[in-house]
Amino acid sequence: MKDEYLSDDELKTLKGMLDEQLESLMSQSREAVSALTTVRETDADPLDLAVSESNRDFTLRLADRERRLVGKIKYALERIQAGEYGVCESCGDAITYGRLMARPVATLCIDCKTEAEQMEPGRRMF
């Protein structure tokens, strides 16, 4: 099924962005894993050890965020293949090209995303 909301050029641009972002994240991930698995010298100073562990924890949290983003990018690429990319998963309306340029992994139009955010538990409403 051909995507009915995005032009071929727009879809090509977005797919290129997704492919590029995926490759970049995969490369960064390989580097992070390599850095984490290298043998560390024993830190004699407790402060050095604390800093080292803090940096390692930060790197692991960042890697987890990147892992989730890789999943979203792969899902977006699957939706492109299926001709479903650019269609809101909630209401079925088009997701604007501007929104997809800003957030290529978006699965909801701006109205549905705003509504979903307002429904999140713990979100303060004024």
Image (cartoon, grey):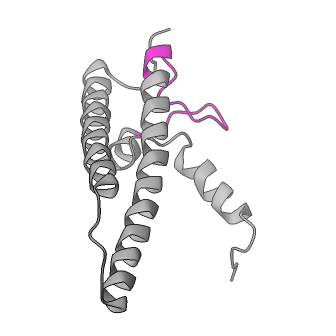
Question: What residue is drawn where x is 70% and y is 78%?
Answer: 125
Q: Is residue 86 visible?
A: no
In this rendering, is residue 40 above or below 36?
A: below
Residue 73, percent from left and from top: 42, 36
Question: What residue is drawn where x is 43% and y is 22%?
Answer: 80
Q: Outermost residue, top direction?
A: 1
Question: What residue is drawn where x is 67% and y is 55%?
Answer: 116
In this rendering, is residue 101 above or below 49?
A: above
Residue 44, percent from left and from top: 30, 85
Count numbered badges in the picture.
0
Q: Which residues are magenta?
A: 80-96
**Can residue 83 be found in the magenta stretch?**
yes
Give the overall secondary structure of the magenta segment: loop
**Can residue 92 be found in the magenta stretch?**
yes
In this rendering, is residue 9 above or below 62?
A: above
Q: Which is nearer the eye, 120 or 126?
A: 120
Residue 31, percent from left and from top: 25, 48
Task: Please give left or right for residue 105 compared with residue 101 in the image.
Answer: right
Q: Is residue 75 visible?
A: yes
Quadrant occupied by the C terminus: bottom right
The image quadrant that residue 18 belongs to is: top left
In this rendering, is residue 90 above or below 99?
A: above
Q: Which is nearer the eye, 63 or 86?
A: 63
The image quadrant that residue 100 belongs to is: top left
Task: Please give left or right for residue 109 compared with residue 60 in the image.
Answer: right
